[in-house]
C-alpha cells in the first residue's frame, strides 16, 4: 500500500512536512500531547480544559498559498523552490503535496513567467502564489507593488454564507477547508446578546468580524496593516455592514477608548496576533480591560501563546478552554484557540 511519504520525493529534505510517514490520526494525537506538555510546563492548567485536536477536512492539497524562492546561480541557471530551514540551500520544487492542485498545475508557468520578469541585476526573488475558491491563480514578488491587486481580481472564500475577500498582499489563512469549523466553534461558545460588542483585534481583512457580524450589535475591528485595512473596508462595504467599523493602528492604542465607548455593554474580544504574539503593552491593555469579560486568543505559535497566557492569567483572566485546530496537516504547526474568561 502506497504511503503519503512515497508520494512526495522531497519528504525529509525540503523541511515542509514532518508527518507524512505516519497516519493522520496519529499525527493529531501527537500534536495534542505536545500542546498539553507545553502548557503543563508553563501554566497550571487542568486536563479538563483541553479538547482533542480538531482535524482538517482536507489533510492534503489544502494550502491556497505557497511562498517560493527564485534564485539565479553563478552559472546563470534559475532555480525555484523552498529554502531548506537553517541553510542557504534551495530545494527545487515542481509540485507540493500540501498545495492545492491549481497551484501545482501552475508551477511550471510560474517559473517561466518569473524568470522572464526577473531583472538582470536580481539574484533572488521571493514569490507568492495564491489561488481563490473559484480556482483563479495569481502571483507576485518581483518589483515594487507586485503584490497589489485590482478589486475585480481579489480572492475570496465563503464563510457562513459570506464572501471574505483578500489579496496577495494581505495575510489570510492558507487552509480554507477548516475556517467554517473554527468560526462555528467560536459562535457556539459566545453568550451573544442583542447589544454585544464584538472586538475583532488584529483583525486582518476581517474574517471573524465579517463572518460573525450578524451575531453582534456592534463590531469593531482593529488592524495595523494598511493593506489589510483596505481589504477589510472593502469587505464591510461589499456586505453593507453599517454596524461594523474599522480602526487602523495598534490594539494597545485603540482598545482603551473603544472599551470606554462600550461601557455597560457586553463585550467579547478575539485576538489573532502575528506569530511573535502580543507586545507587553498589549498584554497590559488586555489585563486592564475590565469591561471585557470573554476573550478568545487564536495563535499559530504555541510557544508565544503560552508566554502571553502567563501574563494574562496572573491576575485578570482564567483559561476556560483550549481548542486546537489542525490548520496545517502533515506539518509540525498547530493553530490553537484559547477561550479566556475574566476572573
Image (cartoon, rainbow, N blue to C red):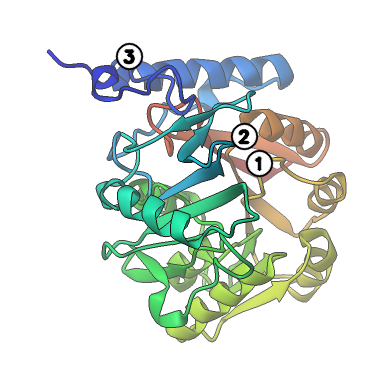
- Residue under label 1, please give it: 275
Residue nearest the observer in this picture, 146 or 317: 146
At mark 3, the secondary structure is: loop
Q: Secondary structure at mark 1?
A: loop
User: Horizontal placement of 39 versus 255: left or right?
Assistant: left
* 57 lies above or below 117: above
In this picture, residue 245 sits left or right of residue 161: right
Q: Are marks 2 and 1 in contact (CB under 8 Å)?
A: yes
Residue 201 visible, this angle = yes
* Residue 282 locus on image (x, y percent): 81, 51
Q: Quadrant of the N terminus?
A: top left
Q: At which x and y percent is residue 69?
A: 53, 43
Q: Which residue is mark 3?
A: 21
Residue 13 vs residue 158: left or right? right
- Residue depicted at x 72% and y 34%: 309
Residue at point 73% right, 70% down? 264
Task: Identify the mark nearer the N-term, 3 or 1.
Answer: 3
Identify whether 332 is placed above or below 135: above
Image quadrant in which the C terminus is located: top right
Look at the image and tell me whether residue 239 can be seen.
no
Q: Residue furthest left?
A: 1
Amino acid at each position: 500500500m502506497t504511503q503519503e511519504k512515497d508520494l512526495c520525493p522531497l519528504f525529509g529534505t525540503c523541511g515542509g512536512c514532518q508527518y507524512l510517514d505516519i497516519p493522520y490520526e496519529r499525527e493529531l494525537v501527537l500534536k495534542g500531547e505536545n500542546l498539553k506538555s507545553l502548557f503543563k510546563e508553563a501554566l497550571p492548567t487542568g486536563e479538563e480544559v483541553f479538547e482533542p485536536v480538531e482535524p482538517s477536512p482536507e489533510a492534503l492539497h489544502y494550502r491556497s498559498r505557497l511562498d517560493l524562492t527564485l534564485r539565479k546561480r553563478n552559472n546563470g541557471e534559475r532555480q525555484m523552490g523552498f529554502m531548506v530551514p537553517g541553510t542557504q540551500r534551495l530545494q527545487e520544487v515542481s509540485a507540493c503535496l500540501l498545495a492545492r492542485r491549481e497551484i501545482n498545475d501552475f508551477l511550471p508557468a510560474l517559473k517561466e513567467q518569473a524568470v522572464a520578469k526577473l531583472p538582470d541585476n536580481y539574484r533572488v526573488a521571493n514569490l507568492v502564489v495564491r489561488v481563490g475558491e473559484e480556482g483563479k491563480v495569481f502571483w507576485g514578488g518581483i518589483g515594487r507593488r507586485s503584490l497589489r491587486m485590482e478589486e475585480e481580481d481579489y480572492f475570496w472564500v465563503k464563510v457562513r454564507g459570506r464572501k471574505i475577500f483578500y489579496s496577495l498582499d494581505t495575510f489570510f489563512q492558507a487552509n480554507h477547508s477548516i475556517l467554517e469549523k473554527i468560526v462555528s466553534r467560536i459562535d457556539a461558545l459566545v453568550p451573544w446578546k442583542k447589544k454585544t460588542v464584538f472586538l475583532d483585534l488584529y483583525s486582518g481583512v476581517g474574517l471573524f468580524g465579517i463572518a460573525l457580524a450578524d451575531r453582534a450589535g456592534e463590531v469593531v475591528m482593529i488592524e495595523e496593516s494598511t493593506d489589510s485595512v483596505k481589504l477589510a473596508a472593502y469587505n464591510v462595504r461589499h456586505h453593507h455592514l453599517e454596524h461594523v467599523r474599522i480602526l487602523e493602528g495598534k490594539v494597545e492604542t485603540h482598545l482603551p477608548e473603544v472599551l470606554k465607548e462600550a461601557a455597560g455593554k457586553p463585550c467579547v474580544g478575539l485576538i489573532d496576533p502575528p506569530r511573535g504574539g502580543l507586545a507587553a503593552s498589549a498584554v497590559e491593555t488586555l489585563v486592564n480591560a475590565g469591561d471585557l469579560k470573554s476573550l478568545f486568543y487564536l495563535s499559530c505559535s504555541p510557544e508565544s501563546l503560552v508566554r502571553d497566557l502567563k501574563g494574562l492569567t496572573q491576575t485578570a483572566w482564567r483559561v476556560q478552554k483550549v481548542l486546537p485546530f489542525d490548520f496545517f496537516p502533515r506539518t509540525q504547526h498547530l493553530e490553537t484557540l484559547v477561550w479566556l474568561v475574566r476572573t
